[in-house]
Amino acid sequence: MNKIKGCIFDLDGVIVDTAKYHYLAWSSLAKELGIAFNEDDNERLKGVSRMESLNIILSLGNRKMTLEEKELLADKKNKKYVECIDKLKEEEILPGVKEFLQELRNEGIKISLGSASKNSRFILDKLALKNYFDCIIDGNKISKAKPDPEVFLAAVREMELKSEECVVFEDALAGVRAAHNGGMKVIGVGSEENLSEADIVIKGFEGISTDILSKL
Ligand code: B16
Ligand code: MG
């Protein structure tokens, strides 16, 4: 196998736990709409785009809306979410992530973001992590949701590498499938149970060094 020359990171659930802030914002909107929405429902929104998340919530309440109404609601949710992430602190970077990114930089391995979030740059700024990234591919640059490989293929292209030279770090099954669909290796971040399709699964980055790349 080719030596790994590029690493692509999902954001939510891999670099920082923003799912809890998405949950706060979506539950406040769901409450306003009179739709019951709990943490289990929130699991279904991980890695899914903003509009698709809203569609899932509306379907939970058997509600139909026009595109215009949905756009207003999605904007409202995002305002609430941005209020929450405006307070994000560097301490919220998941354990071991910064050290791992630094090790990749030291070894000359390229780093890209591959996230569905349109707030990615804002979040990386808040966490003071932007300088680690050679490129940022996010929801503003892509239109197809994971498991479509569009987001990761764009990252590979921007890093000027080949898919087989890259590995994706993902916490969502749709993301694992997207990476495989694009011909990349995947390291799942989370539980073996949810991510068994990944090439390797790690619980998190604590104690993980770049040696893991040679195990792929
Ligand atoms: P935004 P990821 C995803 O981030 C989240 O997991 C998902 O819950 C969210 O709906 C999506 O970003 C869009 O986020 O509303 O900020 O554009 O896991 O792909 O990094
Ligand atoms: Mg994620």
Image (spheres, rainbow, N blue to C red):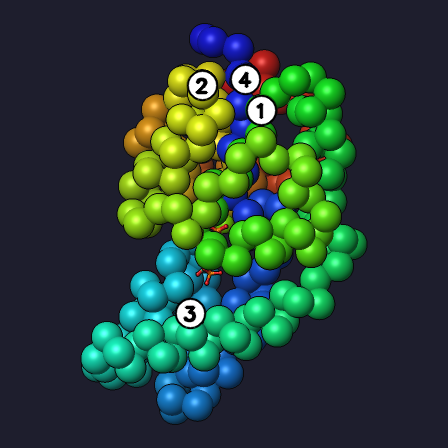
For the residues bearing labels 3 and 2, Cβ distance under 8 angstroms? no
Rendered location of residue 194, percent (x, y): 45, 46
Q: Point out the frontmost of discs 4 and 3.
A: 4
Q: Point out the frontmost of discs 1 and 3.
A: 1
Residue underneath mark 1: 110
Residue underneath mark 4: 5
**Earlier along the polypeptide chain: callout 4 or callout 3?**
4
Q: Is residue 95 left or right of residue 191?
A: right
Residue underneath mark 2: 161
For the residues bearing labels 1 and 4, Cβ distance under 8 angstroms? yes
SS assignment at label 4: loop
Rendered location of residue 202, percent (x, y): 59, 35
On-image quarter of the N terminus: top left
SS assignment at label 1: strand
Q: CA distance from mark 3 to mark 2?
A: 37 Å
**Residue for point 54% across, 52% down:** 120
Residue type, mark 2 in image: Leu
**Residue for point 39% across, 73% down:** 74
**Earlier along the polypeptide chain: callout 2 or callout 1?**
1
Q: CA distance from mark 1 to mark 4?
A: 6 Å
